[in-house]
Amino acid sequence: MTQEEVVCELLNKIEAIENEMVLLRDDRKAVLEEYKEKLDMKAFRAAMQIHKIRRKTDNDYVVDEMLVVMNGDETNG
């Protein structure tokens, strides 16, 4: 393959992926819209962020303990 062919191939693949990403964002938006009357979406988004953070950590207990301190729920201090 020539360099021009490789560039065109890569460009086509990247554009296809970007188009799929647009479709997925639209699908996500439609699903969230569907549930906006059923759930408090602000609370859901916050819970989703917490969920994503917890998936990245090895120890949920430590995260929970830090949240207790940050929320001022600690009675020892």
Image (spheres, helix red, strand yellow):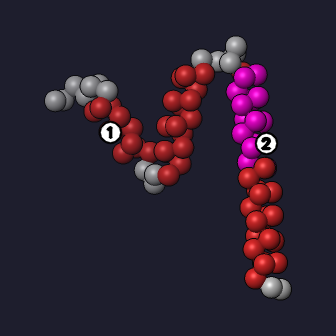
Q: Which residue is mark 2?
A: 23
Dot label at residue 10: none
Q: Position of residue 32 (x, y in %)?
A: 70, 27
Q: Position of residue 10 (x, y in %)?
A: 76, 70
Quarter occupied by the N terminus: bottom right
Return the residue nearer the eye: 9 or 73. Answer: 9
The quarter holding residue 11 reads bottom right
Q: Position of residue 58 (x, y in %)?
A: 45, 54
**Most distant residue in the front direction:** 4
Provide the residue span drawn in magenta. 20-34
Q: Secondary structure at mark 1?
A: helix
Q: Position of residue 51 (x, y in %)?
A: 54, 39
Q: Secondary structure at mark 2?
A: helix
Residue depicted at 78% across the width and 36% down the height:
27
Name the front one of labels 2 and 1: 2
Residue depicted at 76% across the width and 22% down the height:
34
For residue 43, side relative to residue 10 (left or right): left
Dot label at residue 66: 1
Circle 2: residue type: Leu
Give yes or no for residue 25 being in the magenta stretch: yes
Earlier residue among tags 2 and 1: 2
Residue depicted at 72% across the width and 23% down the height:
33
Return the residue nearer the eye: 58 or 42. Answer: 42
Mark 2 closeness class: few <14, some 14–19, many ≥20 residues within 10 Å? few
Give yes or no for residue 55 being in the magenta stretch: no
Circle 1: residue type: Met
For residue 25, side relative to residue 75 (left or right): right
Mark 1 closeness class: few <14, some 14–19, many ≥20 residues within 10 Å? few
**Main structural element of the magenta stretch: helix, strand or loop?**
helix
Quarter occupied by the C terminus: top left
Residue depicted at 39% across the width and 38% down the height:
64
